[in-house]
Every structure is written in C-alpha cells, then in structure tokens.
C-alpha cells in the first residue's frame, strides 16, 4: 500500500547548552528549561530514552516509527539502505546552541567494529540562524598528534588545537565519524545524521558538570588526526558557493553528498512575487525522502493526503509515495525554504 506522508511529534531534549529559540520553529517548550534539541524523526533503540518518534496526525496517529517499520517496512524504506539493526536510516533534529556545545567526536569504524554498543555517527549541520561572529569548531590543527590530543584533554587547553570558522545562515557543515567538532554559541541548525547516539565528549568548556563526564579513552581510540581528517565532502560548504540549479519553479542547492545521505536546499527564485503559488513534483525514486521546512509555508500532497509545511516541521515521504507534490506559497513576501534529505540507496552506487 502507498503510505501517506508522515509528520511526527517532536521529542524535546533538555541540554545544558540549550535555549528557547526552538519556540520560533513551532515547538511548545516547557517553562524555564534550556531545550537544546528537538528530535524530528528518530528511530533509536529502546535503550535510548525517548528515542522513537510517534506520528502526529493522520490514520497512523500515535504509532511509533519503529512499529511502522515492523508492519510496513517495504512501503517505508523501499530500497533505501537501513540503519543499524534495520532501523530508519536517518536521525533528523533541530539544535539551538545558546551556549557552546561540548567538543566531541564519534566512533571510528575500527572502534565501532570492536564495541557492539557503539555505532558510527556521521552528521551534517545546516545553519538556520547565526548571531554575528558565531562560529563552529571543525577538526584539529594538522600538527596535533596522539600525544598532543591527550594532553589537550588532560589540561583543558582544547582551544589551542581546534580549527575554527565563522558561519552564517545557509552554510553546511559536514562531520564524518571520528572528526573532532563543536557547535558554537548563538547558532540554530538543522542536523541530519546516521541513527546513532554514541558521542565521546573531550572537552566541555570547563563546565565541570558531573553529569557530563569526559570520555578520554574512547576518544583517543577514535579521533582522526593529521591527514586522516580529510573527508569525502568539504567540511564547510558556504551557501553562496554551493552548486545551484534554477528552474522556473525552484532553485536547488546541493549542500551535502556522502555515503549515508544527501541534502539539498530548495527555495524560490529571487523574482517571485508575493501571493504566488508554485508547485514541484517530487518523485521518491523508490526510497523515502525527508522534507524539512526552514522558512515560509506550503503544502505537501500525495494522492488524497496532504500535510501543511511551516517552519520547524519535518515530513517523511515514504518510498511507496511514487510522486508527491510540494506547493510553495509566497505570503507577506516570505519565500518558502526547504531542505530535502535523501538516504543512501542500495541500488545507487553513485551516492558518494
């Protein structure tokens, strides 16, 4: 059967570094708590608290994504490469960094192979908002060796070895597993990643919080150093430099393309007037797609089913939706902007 497009209840996560900006993306935040993450589409193991998304509306309302994978696996995934243990292959989030995130990294392939409880975690950040001077920390200086890395952990001198870069709205940051990184304060991002919650914290800006311990030995075993920090896609893709294709109805920017997913930004050409409605046919290609609305409004339609698009909403288009239609609405001179995320296709060996 052709499943309808699916939207899920956000899973809000309290974080020491979080803020309140997610309220502007439609999230109902609990009072007086720093909320750092909204998990939009998640299918993590039961050992991860609050790690499985529930459908927000429609005929499958209240059903977990994990349950739908048990009963409608082929309709959902098609020939997409599944995640660990057959899970949904993507974890989709929004992150609000009111303060600096901890400096961290994720397991190397060798570490994950030797530790069944650890999983690779390759991720990407798409900057949705950034205060002037906001920056990210991506990679270590080329001169840092294993001894220098361990010493920086032990002495708390991590700023001396980190590579930093200013960022602005629309920039994309690509983080392969094993690469040391941190999101700086004053940044709101959409995060796309492989479905893993395995993180090794190496420095926490001297917060000295006993609930946020460092993970020295796993980090030292997994970290990329020197030339091994080279990645399959540039670590930072500037919005102004992304490869762009413009048609009459939409402008498409290629932000990330790697072994696990690809991310495109879809928006309207500059000369579209207020009150205009344009549409884009979106074939699934036999795999699921995720549409994240990052600005403006629209509607996603598939057959007789439809879902409203508004800032902060993420929609999963199942593989069985052969062709869906995205209708863009220009209201109050606010042009819609979407991110389209495509997981790896087992039949497509060009996705890298």
Image (spheres, rainbow, N blue to C red):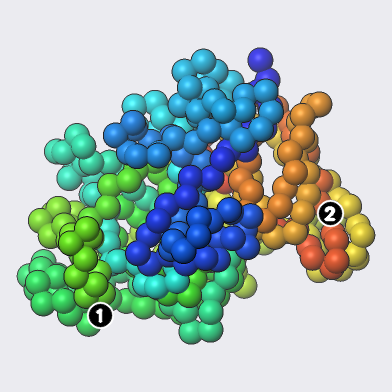
- Residue 269, position in %: x, y? 80, 63
In the image, what residue occupies the spot 19% across and 70% down?
Answer: 208
Q: From this view, report whether residue 2 is shown above or below residue 90.
A: above
Q: Nearer the viewer, residue 50 or 148?
A: 50
Q: Nearer the viewer, residue 8 or 74?
A: 8
| Residue 5 in view of the camera | yes
Q: 105 left or right of 83?
A: left
In the image, what residue occupies the spot 23% across and 41% down?
Answer: 118
Mark 2 neighbour class, 10 Å CA radius: few under 14, some 14 to 19, many 20 or more: many
Q: Dot 1 lies on which element?
A: helix
User: Which mark identifies residue 329?
Assistant: 2
Q: Dot 2 lies on which element?
A: strand
Do the residues bearing badges 2 and 1 touch, measured as CB atoms within 8 Å? no
In the image, what residue occupies the spot 91% across and 57% down?
Answer: 276
Residue 222 falls in image quadrant: bottom left
Q: Report the Cα–Cα distance between label 2 and label 1.
A: 45 Å
- Residue 266, position in %: x, y? 69, 55
User: Which mark identifies residue 326?
Assistant: none
Q: Nearer the viewer, residue 83 or 50?
A: 50
Mark 1 neighbour class, 10 Å CA radius: few under 14, some 14 to 19, many 20 or more: some
- Residue 307, position in %: x, y? 73, 38
In the image, what residue occupies the spot 35% across and 55% down?
Answer: 176
- Number of numbered discs present? 2
- Residue 270, position in %: x, y? 81, 68
Check disc 1 and report the residue beneath it.
159
Q: 268 left or right of 341?
A: right
| Residue 339 in view of the camera | no
Q: From this view, report whether residue 198 is shown above or below residue 305.
A: below
- Looking at marks 2 and 1 on the same chain, the residue that comes earlier in the sequence is marked by 1
Q: 244 left or right of 351?
A: right
Quarter of the figure with the N terminus = top right
């Amino acid at each position: 059967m052709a499943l309808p497009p699916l939207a899920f209840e956000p899973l809000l996560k309290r974080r020491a570094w979080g803020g309140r900006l997610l309220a502007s993306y439609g999230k109902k935040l609990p009072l007086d708590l720093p909320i750092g993450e909204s998990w939009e589409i998640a299918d993590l193991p039961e050992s991860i608290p609050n790690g499985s998304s529930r459908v927000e509306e429609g005929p499958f309302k209240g059903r977990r994504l994990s349950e739908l994978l048990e009963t409608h696996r082929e309709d959902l995934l098609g020939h997409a490469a599944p995640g660990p243990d057959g899970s949904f292959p993507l974890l989709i989030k929004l992150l609000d960094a009111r303060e600096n995130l901890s400096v961290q990294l994720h397991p190397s392939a060798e570490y994950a192979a030797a530790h069944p409880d650890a999983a690779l975690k390759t991720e990407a950040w798409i900057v949705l908002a950034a205060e002037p001077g906001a920056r990210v920390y991506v990679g270590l200086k080329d001169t840092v060796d294993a001894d220098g890395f361990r010493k920086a952990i032990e002495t708390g001198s991590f700023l001396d070895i980190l590579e930093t870069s200013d960022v602005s709205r629309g920039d994309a940051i690509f983080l392969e597993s094993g690469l040391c990184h941190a999101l700086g304060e004053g940044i709101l991002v959409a995060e796309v990643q492989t479905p893993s919650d395995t993180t090794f914290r190496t420095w926490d800006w001297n917060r000295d919080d006993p609930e946020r311990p460092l993970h020295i030995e796993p980090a030292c075993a997994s970290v990329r150093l020197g030339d091994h920090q080279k990645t399959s896609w540039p670590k930072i893709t500037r919005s102004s430099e992304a490869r762009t294709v413009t048609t009459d109805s939409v402008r498409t920017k290629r932000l990330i393309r790697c072994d696990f997913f690809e991310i495109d930004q879809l928006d309207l050409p500059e000369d579209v007037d207020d009150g205009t409605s344009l549409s884009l046919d979106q074939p699934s290609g036999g795999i699921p797609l995720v549409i994240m609305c990052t600005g403006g409004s629209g509607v996603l339609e598939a057959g007789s089913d439809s879902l409203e698009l508004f800032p902060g909403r993420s929609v999963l288009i199942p593989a069985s939706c052969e062709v869906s239609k995205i209708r863009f609405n220009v209201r109050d001179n606010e042009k819609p902007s979407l991110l389209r995320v495509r997981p790896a296709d087992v039949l497509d060996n060009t996705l890298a």
